[in-house]
Image: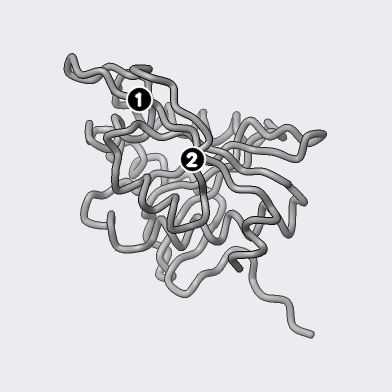
Amino acid sequence: MTNKNLFMGSRILLTAFEEQDAEILAAFSEDTDYLRNLDTDFALPHSSAFFKADMEATLQNKNILDFAVRLHDRTLLGFIALHSIEWTNRRATLAIGIGDKANRCKGYGSEAIQLILDYAFNELNLNRVGLDVISNNETAIQCYKKNGFTLEGTAREAVIRNGQKLNLIYMGILEDEWRAKN
């Protein structure tokens, strides 16, 4: 029996980050739309030195598994991570970002999510993967629903952007739900 490559999809790969990726990540961080959809914190660009240090720190943290999302030709598209992992409770939080606007809404994020969920449930033996998303990020919400995540709760008016009060939506998927879908 041949084992499939856990980190290879039909169009993308999940790989380790390389030192030269720091320059590209720094460029991604100059896009405020990217930053504001990625996180509830204030938008702030970072230098390549910041990303190099972050890569090193992440390697030392057993509760964060961070992957580069790449095309098969090794072009860096973004990242996907399982973080805040609680090994005893078999749960983690998902984060994903596709950096270049030209590469968004092409299904790369969805493919990366399927790979990371397969990894989470089949390799890491997790039971639950959750996430949070700002309510105005409708593209991401639809992507998460398409990949089996369900609404678990809402923190009302938890994020303020340009004076607009937005909800923070909590979504999750359980191992049994993922297996039934796949």
Tell me which corner region of the image, top left, top right, bottom left or bottom right, holds residue 155.
top left
Residue 62 rendering spot, x and y as whole percentages: 72, 35
Considering the image in quadrants, where does the C terminus appear? bottom right
Circle 1 residue: 167
Considering the image in quadrants, where does the N terminus appear? bottom right
Q: Is residue 161 above or below residue 170?
A: above
Q: Name the residue located 28 percent from the left edge and 54 percent from the top edge.
A: 104
Residue 135 rendering spot, x and y as whole percentages: 32, 33
Q: Is residue 117 above or below residue 94?
A: below
Q: Name the residue located 39 percent from the left edge and 49 percent from the top edge.
A: 78
> What mark, if any, has residue 125 been given in the picture?
none
Q: Amino acid at mark 1?
A: Asn
Residue 61 rendering spot, x and y as whole percentages: 68, 31
C-alpha gap between disc 1 and disc 2:
13 Å
Is tag 1's residue or tag 2's residue first in the polypeptide sequence?
2
Tell me which corner region of the image, top left, top right, bottom left or bottom right, holds residue 35.
top left
Residue 66 rendering spot, x and y as whole percentages: 56, 43
Label 2, residues with CA under 10 Å away: few <14, some 14-19, many ≥20:
some
Q: Amino acid at mark 2?
A: Leu
35 vs 27, nearest the viewer: 35
2 vs 137, nearest the viewer: 137
Q: Name the residue located 59 percent from the left edge and 63 percent from the top edge.
A: 7
Tell me which corner region of the image, top left, top right, bottom left or bottom right, holds residue 180.
bottom right
Q: Name the residue located 28 percent from the left edge and 57 percent from the top edge.
A: 105
> What mark, if any, has residue 151 been given in the picture?
2
